[in-house]
Amino acid sequence: MDLDRKTMAMGNGGIDMWTYEKKLQYPVKIKNPDPSIAKVVITQVGGPDGELAASMRYLSQRYSMPYKECIGVLNDIGTEELAHLEMISAIVHQLTRNMTIEQIKESGFDTYFVDHTAGIYPQAAAGVPFTAKFFQSKGDAITDLVEDMAADAAPLERQLFKYFSF
């Protein structure tokens, strides 16, 4: 199959693959750095229940989905998870910009800082780097959808326990 560069860049039939607005859906405006919070929030970037794993989960599973309507939904959810990744990364960036050496040491952020400075590196809060082991794509529609529900239930469960005492 011969494709010229313009066709490849534009996608199928010369239509743009992506329309990207250079603004966050929900603007992040953190005034004071706090690396101790960034140490926890970073897990939403690259942890097992984070946005990177979620986006890869949905975008990978769409290829073996036998139903066209579900393919579109998985694609939409996967790209939405990438938008979440961008917002969470902005939070981590703003929590770690302009840190003092004292803040870095006192917060325990020094173990992250020594390898990544204030760069956004996908890892869990415990320091485990992102890995494809955090998600599944089995090729079976039911198995994959159950995986999706289980993965999305973990953050939801934490939110429920935060707001309601049982």
Image: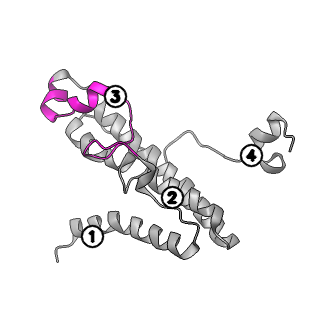
The disc, 4 or 1, on the residue closer to the chain's N-terminal end is 4
User: Where does residue 122 sit, x and y in percent of width and height?
Assistant: 39, 41
Left or right: 82, with 16 as reference point: left
The amino acid type found where label 2 is placed reads Arg
Q: Which residue is mark 3?
A: 116
Q: CA distance from mark 2 to mark 1?
A: 23 Å
Q: CA distance from mark 2 to mark 3?
A: 26 Å
The amino acid type found where label 1 is placed reads Leu
Q: Which residue is mark 4?
A: 16
Q: Quadrant of residue 165?
A: bottom left
Q: CA distance from mark 2 to mark 4?
A: 24 Å
Task: Please count the marks in the image.
Answer: 4
User: Where does residue 143 sit, x and y in percent of width and height?
Assistant: 51, 73
The disc, 3 or 1, on the residue closer to the chain's N-terminal end is 3
Q: Quadrant of the N terminus?
A: top right
Q: Which residue is mark 2?
A: 57
Instruction: Please tell me whether residue 113 is drawn above or below residue 19 in the rendered image.
Output: above
Q: CA distance from mark 3 to mark 1?
A: 33 Å
Q: Quadrant of residue 160?
A: bottom left
Q: Which residue is mark 1?
A: 160
Identity of the residue drawn at 62% across and 43% down: 20
